[in-house]
Image: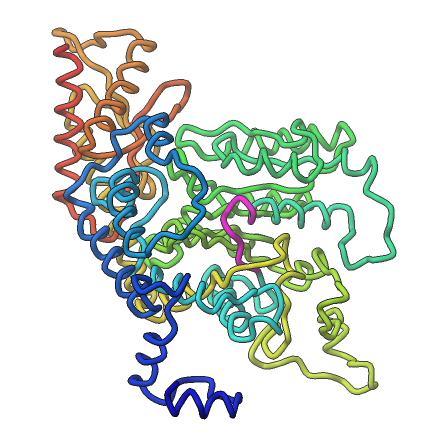
Amino acid sequence: MSAKRDEEKSNPVRPVFPVSAEESAAESRDRPLGDNTADDPGLREMGYAMVDLIVEYLNGLEGRRVYGPLSPAGMDDMFEETLPEEGTPFLDLVQDFRTRVFPNTMAIGSRRYFGMMNPAPLPVAVFSEALCSAMNQNTASWRHAPSGTAIEKRVIRWLCDMFGLPEGSFGTMTDGGSLANITGLKLAINRALGRDLSQVDNLEGPGSEMAQLTFYVSGQAHYSFDKAVDLLGIGRGQLRKIPHDDIFRIDLQALDDSLRQDIENGLKPACIIGVAGTTNTGSIDKLDKLAELARKYDCWFHVDAAYGGAVILSEMYGPMLRGIERADSITVDPHKWFYMPFSAGGILVRDGDFLRRSFLVHPEYYMEKVMKDTAAESQDNGTGRRVIPDKRGFHMGDKVNFFQYGIQGSRRMNALKLWLSFKSVGRRQFAAWVEKDIELARILAARMRRQADFRILGPNTLGVCNFRWEPRGPSGGLRFDSDTNDQLNRDLQELVEREGDAWFSFTVLNGQVALRVNVENRFMEQNDIERLVQVIRRAADRILDT
């Protein structure tokens, strides 16, 4: 054993960090991971191998198929194996990953991927995930993640300010938009029933009052609201699916009629939900009008801005979200148009203290000081002396425990990647990327309008472009009936998917199958759009030639 090891053995108190890079490297070599076999690399070597693997994957995206060729049965066969009894050398696993995993992934970061709201993630966010795992902080409580809690508070403040929410607003990161939407509806229920979890002496359930609550959302809204009403113990019939207008926004007159009819029938409207960027078409409801209706009928106003919320970054397109600053709660999803890797969602709440009261629990094993209501704490801290709120803003200086602000208990440090990315890139660059994506989607719409046998559907508001293939006969009329055209559009999507030249999805709009292209890639340029049009044109011609 070296003299250094002898010294450490006699003196177990060691510095937090190695004294030098040389000592750090020696430390890595002296402490191999895993089973300590000679071919098992140390942490540093493992990290280098993983970085090389990531770079190899990203650099190879444009030279491979967008979608893997194997069937589900073929994939299951490829990974058929029993649980290993002994470990495998790490470098063998790297090669296994290279040969089995990479070739059979959806090439999300490719400039030929036009699918769902899955971005090419920022590199600083990718590597922040490794830092997050290495620190393994549980941001449920301040004590277990002091810096992680402070970072999340700062990110939440940035987002609240970004959307124009007041100083007393707050929020929490979630694993995605679905959980944020469920949280928003839970807050709406609490507000409607005048109850919250902090009322520990309230042992009676809501009973028949819950059955009187009604919720209102566009028929174009995300499926998470169907899940939310079920999870929260609300009947599916209590979620009113309101028809949409000609550009797939919630029909305001139909909404008003539904609200008045429910009140006349003795029901209690609890929540109006606005959508800022639907998954199908990117349509944005008239949020300012919905805010007025929510005030008129004394409803909670929740906005699902999981997709379209990113346009708030842009001075050019931000006004599309006019009225969102009047929301009681807002769902955000940075792992969509903020170019974050999964997972990174969040909910922002106008009344931050109401959010806390709605989820406030005091487990014995978290021995933190119980916070009083903010309003009371600003007047009296129990000593009879007036306490002046922290000038830095709501909850600044407070020991926040995020498990008391939402559904989740154990929580990853998901705010880290967003914090590092905002600091690394800045708002202006984010805005420029979003603006470019919108412009490219509009260029695509213009190109498809030039095709006589394609028809644009939807508003083409954000980065989503919908169109339908309708082959024409010699006289210029439709060559096939609607059902046949539905199948032709499915066939076109499947042919492009099978050949791997690009990937986009199809959806159903007004009862008709439509092809759906989403532009969400900061690397994409106009020539990528032109190439996609050629791929679609060739596929359509081939189908008709068979």
- The C terminus lies in quadrant: top left
- The N terminus lies in quadrant: bottom left
Looking at the rendering, which quadrant does residue 249 occupy?
top left
Query: Which residues are drawn in magenta?
Result: 172-180
Q: Position of residue 34 (x, y in %)?
A: 41, 62
* Magenta span includes 133: no
User: Tag count in the figure?
Assistant: 0
Give the residue displayed 56% in from the left and 65% down from the top.
139
Q: Position of residue 281 (x, y in %)?
A: 37, 35
Give the residue displayed 42% in from the left and 42% down from the top.
277
Q: Is the residue 120 above or below the residue 389 in the image?
A: above
283 to the left or right of 122: right
Q: Position of residue 66 (x, y in %)?
A: 23, 37
Q: Position of residue 398 (x, y in %)?
A: 63, 76
Q: Which residue occupies the foreground of this view, 72 or 238?
A: 72
Q: Which residue occupies the foreground of this view, 253 or 139?
A: 139
